Image (cartoon, rainbow, N blue to C red):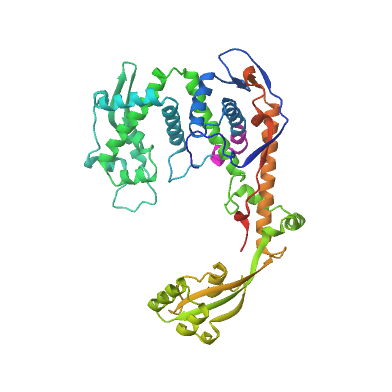
């Protein structure tokens, strides 16, 4: 799952708001809280950090909108986690960074935006003094690699430390650091290895010692960011924990929405949607088809002309003449070697045939009307220029495989969206939500129902 900086909602671009239904108490009066959700508290400092980051990209966002997102992510993220489990809603593959590493990256990015000036200045100063904070810097020697990695003489199906290498890597210190008397630590080879994506692991398995050493230093800088936040940002330990949990909740919320398919493309392989689509009835498909028949338009036939030549040079010559305004009929009679040259290359009507498409019909149905195609090399080695003069549209049959597939997918996603909306509203209505009185009247995006926009025609229009 791709992650960027803190964003208000995975579905923000897909949803519009409607009437309010949830009941929320605006009864907090003390200055240490802006909201509580089922006993989980959000402080003004946490809200301010998230507001700075969110409004950096979307200046129109209000603090109330950011607070609403924090609350919604808390409820929906934890629901998704409990219902489906972390393995289902958090993508963990062998190519990308590990989920925990992605969350650490996002946390640091948030802090670097929220505290841009002071943290930026501190990092510049730290960079100049980095060597002074390091000790016992000890890069991997050529003779050591076999201690940690499988032999490079054997084929590896995937990048991984050897069984004994995992234990050794955790003990192998690459560098020690010291930020102050209470904040010291070490970066191990294991720390570096498990902070990498597949490209980084490739470099390590290529035994690039300099890369490992550079990554160890980068991890020291990363830890310095966390050190600075703890000691100089003004945030409490509870605030920091709350921000990290907010990032995790957002990951879970995004993952839940993706897992049930409401944020997926119609052709994405979503097992949950597949299970819903398999239960869609013929009556539901027919009803959808009748209401959205224009979404199932297709080109039934095209009227075409062509010019066939023996070589690419001649084909390019004809193409240039057409661009300069040459008449297709005349150029066909002059240059084409096809039997229909005297008829201006007239092919007549080409019928849509999904079961037995030819290369010519495939090309024809892709072309725009009254625009000559570029020269295309044919399977028999000749060159072809195609010209479509007319297209006739019709509709796919309601009982066709393509209609059944598309309609079932759309209906399934609509059901998933309805389920999502019902779960969301139920959670908000039943949760013990208290918000600071100063936000009263500003929470329509939380209290209101959400309407997931339908898929666009481009997502499922079959040509």
The one of 99 and 264 positioned closer to us in this rendering: 264
Q: How far across and how far down the image is residue 124, in percent?
A: 31, 27
Residue 337 visible, this orientation: no
- In the displayed structure, 397 sits above or below 149; it is below
- In the displayed structure, 368 sits above or below 75; it is below
Q: Is residue 41 magenta?
A: no
Q: Is residue 94 left or right of residue 183?
A: right
Q: In which quadrant of the rendered image does the C terminus lie?
A: bottom right
Q: How far across and how far down the image is residue 223, in percent?
A: 36, 27
Q: How far across and how far down the image is residue 72, in percent?
A: 61, 30
- In the displayed structure, 287 sits above or below 330; it is above
Q: Quadrant of residue 169?
A: top left
Magenta-colored span: 78-89
* Residue drawn at 46 percent across, 18 percent down: 235
The one of 104 and 462 positioned closer to us in this rendering: 462
Residue 255 visible, this orientation: yes
Q: Is residue 426 left or right of residue 327?
A: right
Q: Is residue 116 left or right of residue 22?
A: left
Q: Is residue 74 left or right of residue 211?
A: right
Q: Is residue 82 magenta?
A: yes
The extreme top residue here reads: 30
The one of 280 and 127 positioned closer to us in this rendering: 127
Count of residue discs: 0
* Residue drawn at 33 percent across, 26 percent down: 123
Q: How far across and how far down the image is residue 98, in percent?
A: 44, 39
- Which secondary structure is most common in the magenta stretch? helix
């Amino acid at each position: 799952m791709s992650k960027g900086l803190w964003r208000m909602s995975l579905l923000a671009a897909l949803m519009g708001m409607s009437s309010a239904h949830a009941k929320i108490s605006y009864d907090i009066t003390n200055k240490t809280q802006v909201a509580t959700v089922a006993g989980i508290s959000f402080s003004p400092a946490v809200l301010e950090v998230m507001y700075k980051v969110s409004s950096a990209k979307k200046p129109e966002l209000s603090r109330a909108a950011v607070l609403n997102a924090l609350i919604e992510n808390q409820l929906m993220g934890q629901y998704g986690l409990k219902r489906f489990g972390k393995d289902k809603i958090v993508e963990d593959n062998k190519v990308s960074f590990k989920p925990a590493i992605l969350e650490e990256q996002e946390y640091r990015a948030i802090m670097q935006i929220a505290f841009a000036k002071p943290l930026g200045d501190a990092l510049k100063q730290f960079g100049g003094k980095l060597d002074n904070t390091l000790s016992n810097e000890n890069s991997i020697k050529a003779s050591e690699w076999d201690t940690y990695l499988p032999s490079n003489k054997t084929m590896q199906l995937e990048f991984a430390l050897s069984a004994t290498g995992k234990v050794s890597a955790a003990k192998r210190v690459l560098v020690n650091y010291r930020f102050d008397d209470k904040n010291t630590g070490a970066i191990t080879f294991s720390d570096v290895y498990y902070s990498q994506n597949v490209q980084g692991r490739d470099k390590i398995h290529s035994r690039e010692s300099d890369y490992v050493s550079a990554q160890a230093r980068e991890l020291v800088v990363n830890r310095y960011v966390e050190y600075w936040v703890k000691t100089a940002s003004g945030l409490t330990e509870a605030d920091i924990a709350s921000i990290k949990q907010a990032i995790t909740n957002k990951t879970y919320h995004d993952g839940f929405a993706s897992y049930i398919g409401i944020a997926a493309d119609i052709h994405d392989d979503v097992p949950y949607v597949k299970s819903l689509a398999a239960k869609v009835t013929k009556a539901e498909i027919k009803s959808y088809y009748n209401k959205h028949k224009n979404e199932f338009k297709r080109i039934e036939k095209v009227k075409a002309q062509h010019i066939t030549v023996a070589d690419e040079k001649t084909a390019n010559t004809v193409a240039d003449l057409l661009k300069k305004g040459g008449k297709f009929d005349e150029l066909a009679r002059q240059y084409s070697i096809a039997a229909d040259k005297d008829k201006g290359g007239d092919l007549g009507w080409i019928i849509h045939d999904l079961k037995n498409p030819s290369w010519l019909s495939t090309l024809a149905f892709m072309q725009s009307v009254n625009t000559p195609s570029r020269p295309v090399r044919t399977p028999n080695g000749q060159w072809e220029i195609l010209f479509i003069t007319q297209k006739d549209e019709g509709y796919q049959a309601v009982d066709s495989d393509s209609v059944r597939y598309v309609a079932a997918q759309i209906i399934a996603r609509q059901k998933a969206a309805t389920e999502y909306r019902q779960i969301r509203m139920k959670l908000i209505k039943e949760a013990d939500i208290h918000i600071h009185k100063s936000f009263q009247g500003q929470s329509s995006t939380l209290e209101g129902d959400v309407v997931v926009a339908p898929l666009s025609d481009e997502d499922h229009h079959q040509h």
